[in-house]
Amino acid sequence: MASLNVTHPWDVSSDLNHSSFKSNLTELEDTQPTEKNWPALFILGFIFFTVAGNILVIMAVSIERKLHNATNYFLCSLAVADMLVGFLVMPAALITILYNHTWPLPELLCPLWIFLDVLFSTASIMHLCAISLDRYIGIRNPIKYSQSNTLHKTMIKIISVWTVSVVLSLPIPVMGFQDKKKVFVNSTCTLNEPRFVLVGSSVAFFVPLVIMVVCYYLTLHHLQRHSASFPQESSKHLSVQRSETSLLNIKSSFNKPAQGARNNSRRGTIQSLNNERRASKVLGIVFFLFLVMWCPFFITNVLIAICQDNCSELLHDLIHFFVWVGYISSGVNPLIYTLFNKTYRQAFARYLRCKYH
């Protein structure tokens, strides 16, 4: 039995509505990420780990009395910068990955995002540079340093580090708001001012990096020279020194008070040297990882600024990868403190069990 092909008026309206809906759906699909991106799930987990880990560091330095010293205050401020990287910078970077490195957010946010990215990375290297200088001065002139190193002066140093970082990063939003071409390249949100990239990379990264490495080397050199004054004692572990009985100490101090005072002073000096060695070891790992993780990005960024339009696509692809290698440094510091510092490790374990006292 033949079927009748009859067209009714409401069929035409239905076809038009269906066509309009299909067209809108196609436009919506064009603006949404369509492919599954499993690495993005890993990045999301890393963002959570970065924020949570640095919050634990901030809590530990704020609560634990043993961590109330200049170096740990600097590390706490560094943790604030790393936490803000995970909270404000990484999520937007993840969104650009989902959209094939194009900027899907409002254009006004692009220069602000670049400003925050540069600010926090600059603050990180400035903090590490300040820690290196502060520790070198402390070991070079320990008496003068201990007398002048108050909490108030430490806070002034930290505020100075943040101020320098803000001043070095502030031209970015100014340029971006005046000319969108300075922050957009083929719909990609990236800094497009070669002269600023060259000068900024030198002032905000390479110069502080050289200062940091030189100060760390000089610090180790002074520690080794002081340790040479105690060749036998300094090679012993502190646990062996602490295993001496209190009765023996009482006898020696009772019979020969002057000699006992000298011995106590000597042991105190040796213990301080050992503490400085352990602290230098942890900070050395932090410095090394920061150097390894951020150098590829800054070197590639400088090469792109030099060659400009003549750069190969490989450099542009590499810089998208290297920037995430740099972001990793914001998340690994809490792990380093956990592995190499007992006070941080015990504090983190308590906080994760909601025991803050």
Image (tube, rainbow, N blue to C red):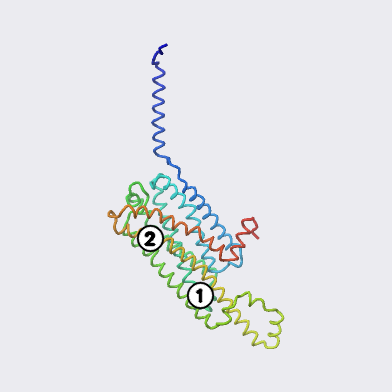
Disc ID at residue 351 = none
Q: Amino acid at mark 2?
A: Phe
Between 96 and 315, the one nearer to me in the picture: 315
Q: Quadrant of the N terminus?
A: top left
Residue furthest out toward the front = 1
Q: Using residue 280 as the reference point, say whether residue 346 is left or right of it.
A: right
Q: Is 99 situated above or below 318?
A: above
Q: Residue at x 49, y 47 (%)?
A: 41
Disc ID at residue 138 = 1
Between 165 and 243, the one nearer to me in the picture: 243
Q: Earlier in the sequence, mark 2 or mark 1?
A: 1
The reply to whether dot 2 and dot 1 touch (C-beta < 8 Å) is: no
Q: Amino acid at mark 1?
A: Gly
Q: CA distance from mark 2 to mark 1?
A: 31 Å
Q: Say what secondary structure mark 1 lies in.
A: helix
Question: Are there few (<14), some (14-19), or many (20+) residues within 10 Å of tag 1?
Answer: some
Q: Is 192 situated above or below 61?
A: above
Total number of numbered labels? 2
Q: Quadrant of the C terminus?
A: bottom right
Q: Is 332 situated above or below 279?
A: above
Q: Horizontal and vertical percent for residue 80? A: 51, 59
Q: Is 258 situated above or below 292?
A: below
Q: Say what secondary structure mark 2 lies in.
A: helix
Q: Where, by quadrant of the figure, is residue 311 drawn?
A: bottom left
Q: Which residue is mark 2?
A: 298
Q: Using residue 70 as the reference point, say whether residue 313 is left or right of it.
A: left
Q: Horizontal and vertical percent for residue 300? A: 36, 59
Q: Residue at x 45, y 73 (%)?
A: 215
Q: Horizontal and vertical percent for residue 228? A: 52, 82
Between 235 and 118, the one nearer to me in the picture: 235
